[in-house]
Amino acid sequence: MRKNKDFRREPLTDTQLLMTITICIFVAMYLLAMAFLQGGFLHAQQIFDMLNDNASLIIVSCGLTIVMIGGGIDISVGAVTSLVVMSCILYLNNGGNIFVSILLALGIGVAFGLVHGFLVSYLEIQPFIVTLAGMFFARGLTTILSVNPQKVDHEGFAKLRDAKIVIPWLGYTAKNGNRVPARIELGVVVAFVCVLLIFVLLKYIKLGRNFYAMGGNQTSALMLGINVKRTRFISYVLSGLLSGISGYVFMMHTGAGNATNAAGMEMNAIASSIIGGTLLTGGVGNVVGTLFGTLTLTTIKKIVVSSGLNDPWWQSITTGGMLCFFILLQSVVLARRAKKKKS
């Protein structure tokens, strides 16, 4: 006789559970908006516009997710993004080459990542202090480059900025009867490629698993033979690299920049990561959750505006309330899960 095999599914990990909750809440929120607010929520372009407007935020949030999974924090990402935008605009306006401008963006991001990683990992300075100093330094450099708003005046870049992926069958019919096709900017493609690569890194590559081990318990990670200092150093370098990419994508979307570019982006990135299921204590997180965390954050802001609450403080209030809700939800879910494991 054959023995009956037990095909019971393994329980979801904390990362998978929190990511699933975020996705479900986003879907439910968007469906409710479609049902009661209608308007643009009924068109696929609304989703594409959310992605077009937040492609740079998605990228920088993914970098911050890596750092937070490892138990760190990086609050300089918004300022580095701003510095990249201004540097690349001035370079292109002075007859620069597009390919070299991309290298410039990546170089600035990696440079900040190297400095932050070295100070945090090898000199063991608190990451909040290090990245706070990096934020002020990047903001100061941006102001030195130009106080006035700058617009990209480069023919080659204009073609890159205006290039879009058109999907006619996902469009909609406007009130005047014209058919408006759905449009996706190239920055969204870059954002999804970054999400995919980081997802593979965290799930299937040893370095990614080391991030989780380091953030979960540094002592245990050391006992497992993981080079914690090097792993933490790499996490900050990756965060800096993604900030550089984010800056260029931001410039591709706006085609302009000023000294206050990406102001508050670091806070939105932290909020997106937390809503997506990344814990500030480290060891838990997923970039797919971060992607949906960004979309959830954007959706609630659009719902507020569609409801007639156009004053900017209403968006801040709802964002703060949602962040508190997700932090409380994470605490309750993980506490119940830990209790079940003990019993």
Image (cartoon, rainbow, N blue to C red):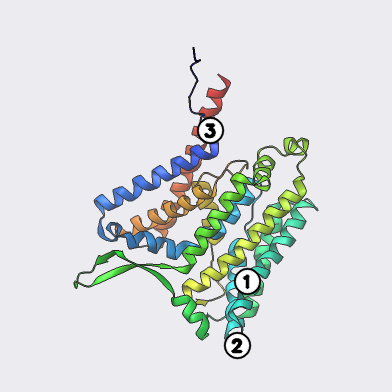
Which percent across, then down, holds residue 326?
Answer: 47, 43
Which percent across, then down, holds residue 307?
Answer: 29, 56
Q: Are marks 2 and 1 in contact (CB under 8 Å)?
A: no
Q: Which of 86 and 126 is in front in this view?
A: 86
- Sequence-wise first label, 2 or 1: 2
Q: Nearer the viewer, residue 89 or 170?
A: 170
- Sequence-wise first label, 3 or 2: 2
Residue 278 vs 146, above or below: the answer is: above
Q: How crowded is mark 1: few (under 14 residues within 10 Å), some or many (20 or more)?
A: many
**Which residue is denoted by mark 1 in the rendering?**
105
- Residue 165 is drawn in which quadrant? bottom left
For the C terminus, which image quadrant? top right
- Sequence-wise first label, 1 or 3: 1
**Which residue is denoted by mark 3 in the rendering?**
334
Residue 308 vs 102, above or below: the answer is: above
The three-letter amino acid code for the residue at tag 2 is Gly
Which percent across, then down, holds residue 208?
Answer: 64, 47
- Residue 146 is drawn in which quadrant? bottom right
The three-letter amino acid code for the residue at tag 1 is Ala
Q: Residues within 10 Å of mark 2 (few under 14, many from 20)?
A: few
Disc number for residue 95? 2
